[in-house]
Amino acid sequence: MYQKNPFFDTLVQCTAEHIDKIGGTLQINTVKIESLHEEINRIISRTTVVNAIVLATDLDENDIDFIENKIKNVVFVDTSFRKLKADFVTPDNYQGAYEAGMFLLNHNYRRIGYLASNKATQNFLSRREGLRDSLATQNLKLAEKDFYVVDFANLFSKNSLNSINFNDLPEAFFCENDIIAIRLIKELTHRNILVPRDIGVMGFDDVSTAALCSPELTTVHIPTIQIVEQAVRDLQAQVASKEFKGQKTFITTEIIEREST
């Protein structure tokens, strides 16, 4: 999933640039989630890793615990688990999706659909909760018939959106990320369903291509630079003091209104 979402490329690039700016050195290791434990052990056996920023989007609680026990100072980026004492820096996915729902409601959309990834990460679960809670402020619910799950790994295959009933669409779709939203707009255009005249579409992440698709995508912006800067500060604090306690930092998001709503 990491390799298929440009948001992660931006996050890694910002981290590299920030580390270089403060005079540090950065070694980037990519591991497969299916063999995470084996590959972490292999990396540690080849080199001394005592400080790390981990892009933890797809990790579960057991993975976090494993890495915490292997690396002395570590900050996990782009996820958070309430039960764990680890250090997390992540966008506030609940707040972002809640605000997105309120934005759609304020634009007079009432029947709002949801296009979800089949990869139910902690981030996505928080987005679902936020969107549902925003609808509840108007005594509305996310209808089961308007909640669709797509295979993110095969999103741009010909039949990837066949589960959607294009003969009975909601007034607007909130998509779990921008890539899903862009794929939806492409499919709607192919079927001569015009955005936003016939249906609104909103994404999440504000990837670079969100402003390049047609129509330009309304989305939720994640302040990537601020996330990186906070993660580096947390890591420096861990190195400086054995008394530093893990903290959970949620970075707020903002709506970027464009042409698709």
Image (tube, helix red, strand yellow):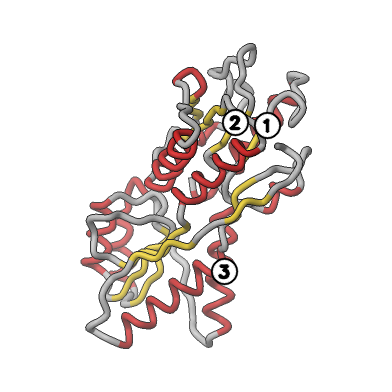
Distance of mark 1 from mark 2, alpha carbons? 6 Å
Question: 116 left or right of 17?
Answer: left
Residue 147 placed where, x, y %? 48, 25
- Contact flag, marks 1 and 2 (Cβ < 8 Å): yes
Identify the element where label 1 is drawn. Answer: strand
Mark sitting on residue 173: 2
Residue 155 placed where, x, y %? 57, 32
Question: 242 left or right of 207?
Answer: left
Mark sitting on residue 200: 1
- Sequence-wise, which precedes: disc 1 or disc 3? 1
Q: Is residue 75 above or below residue 153?
A: below
- Sequence-wise, which precedes: disc 2 or disc 3? 2
- Sequence-wise, which precedes: disc 1 or disc 2? 2
Distance of mark 1 from mark 3, alpha carbons? 29 Å
Residue corresponding to mark 3: 225
| Outermost residue, front side | 138
Name the residue rendered at 30%, 75% in the picture.
73
Image quarter for residue 79?
Answer: bottom left
Q: Amino acid at mark 2?
A: Phe
Is disc 1 surrounded by few (<14), some (14 to 19) or many (20+) residues within 10 Å? many
Q: Amino acid at mark 3?
A: Ile
Name the residue rendered at 68%, 53% in the picture.
208
